[in-house]
Image: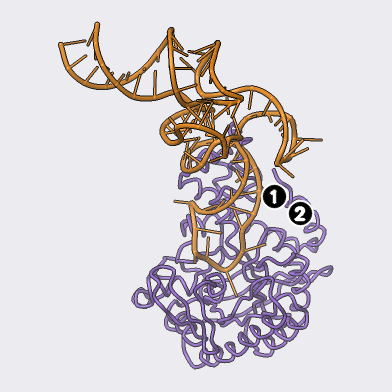
Chain colours: A purple, B orange
Amino acid sequence: MNFRIVKSDIESQARSGIIETDHGNIQTPIFMPVGTAATVKAVHQTELTNDINADIILGNTYHLYLRPGMEVMRAAGGLHNFMGWNRPILTDSGGYQVFSLAANRKLKSEGAYFSSHIDGSKHLFTPENVVDIQRDIGADFIMAFDECTPYPCDPKYARDSMHLTHSWLGKGIKHFKYTESKYGHNQCFIPIVQGSVYPDLRKESAEFIAAQGMDANAIGGLSVGEPVEDMYAMLEIVNGILPVEKPRYLMGVGTPVNILEGIARGVDMFDCVMPTRNGRNGMLFTQKGIMNMRNEKWKSDFSLLDHDGTSFVDKAYSKAYLRHLIVSGERLGAQIASIHNLAFYLWLVREARDQIIAGSFTSWKNSMVKVLVSRL
RNA sequence: GGGGAGAUACCAAAGUGGCCAACUGGGGCAGACUGUAACUCUGCUGGCGUAUGCCUUCGGAGGUUCGAAUCCUCCUCUCCCCA
């Protein structure tokens, strides 16, 4: 993997660049659609490439390990082959699932014991076997195994958790270096900064992660319920320490505004379930603000779904039609909404990139932020 | 012609003297959703801008009672069975 910055903004920390992988280039800043279980829910791969123009998508270690399992994954020749996606893939390590499935987890120094949500069977994730699993999956970017602390989180817990994540990181990197890619393409290992909302912990963690010298770095444990000001403050601290010349990935973020503010603070990569999940639940993100498609006001509004939209669905269907599909629980509604939202998110980061290159990012960002929070 | 059952809020359906402005489900309306156990979850759904408050409701009209959706009388309508 190689990263080069094409243009850095003067008024902010924003930059645009290109990440080169064996599965193609990624123009940054980038938003990565989440495809947890070998599918971006309700969206075809052809739509992702031809219409939405996603440079890279996510997969999830936890889900793929449980189903279909690594035997199938190896037999398929990896996730790219399995799902018919030949662009880059990043897999999350399962660290977030350890957090979100808190009811069943048990953390030990060696790793996380958990019960499958599918059949209740018991499993153990370790910093090492999570690398093995992601080798089997064959993701271009593989994530370190971490604990994503909840919010609120007391300082003691946050500190202990961060140190646990750091110790897991040492084991993970060692195992990563000891093992090899299985399908002939290069894989990049990404360590994750933790530290909750505590500046001293974030500083310590960012320094620890930066010292590992990996090709890209990630920021985790944010957008878990903390005030956005805290998230932005942590980003500023962390990105002041993580190396400028390497991609920075803010995990799980976020709203369109979060993404713009993240870009302004030097983040290059984002992922979030919001465009797909909220889309399935009837929410549309647009350049003019958000729309709840279930609202009665769209009932007889036959105007284009989104006049400014870049996806084919925006011009092919009306607001009234999508409302009908969503309200009726029709699957096509989830598809149209997901495609629209992802296309919007990808438009947003592409536009940000163009504005950075044009030198007009900050003023554009500030005016966008004002509009995006409004409700249509 | 004979016998029987029933009419409850947008729909379906509980309740059969006070704890009922009325269970529950659907529908409707609104909100939430941030490294996806999520086509999910939450709230509201007679009126009064809020209410542990007031007002008007349970086919219609009377009546019994301190008190009725619940008991009585008559009326209207619906459904089922036998001829």
Residue A322: percent from the left, percent from the top? Answer: 54, 41
Amino acid type, residue under disc 1 in the picture: Gln
Pick the quarter of the image with the N terminus of chain A.
bottom right
Q: Is A22 located above or below residue A308 in the figure?
A: below
Element under label 2? helix
**Which residue does the image show at 48% across and 58% down from the upper left?**
A41
Pointer 1 chain: A
Residue B67: percent from the left, percent from the top? Answer: 59, 26
Could you tell me if the residues under marks 1 and 2 are in contact, i.e. CB atoms within 8 Å? yes
Amino acid type, residue under disc 2 in the picture: Met
Q: Residues within 10 Å of mark 2 (few under 14, many from 20)?
A: some
Whether discs 1 and 2 lie on one chain: the answer is yes
**Which residue does the image show at 52% across and 43% down from the upper left?**
A326
Residue nearest the viewer, comparing A235 with B29: B29
Residue B64: percent from the left, percent from the top? Answer: 54, 18
Pointer 2 chain: A
**Which residue does the image show at 50% across and 68% down from the upper left?**
A87
**Quarter holding residue A18:** bottom right
Judging by the rendered image, the residue that carries numbered circle 1 is A287
Residue nearest the viewer, comparing A88 with B20: B20
Label annotation for residue A245: none
Residue A307: percent from the left, percent from the top? Answer: 65, 42
**Which residue does the image show at 51% across and 77% down from the upper left?**
A105
Judging by the rendered image, the residue that carries numbered circle 2 is A368
Q: Left of B60 or right of it: where is A70? A: left
**Visible residue check, residue A363:** yes
Q: Left of A146 or right of it: where is A366? A: right
**Visible residue check, residue A357:** no
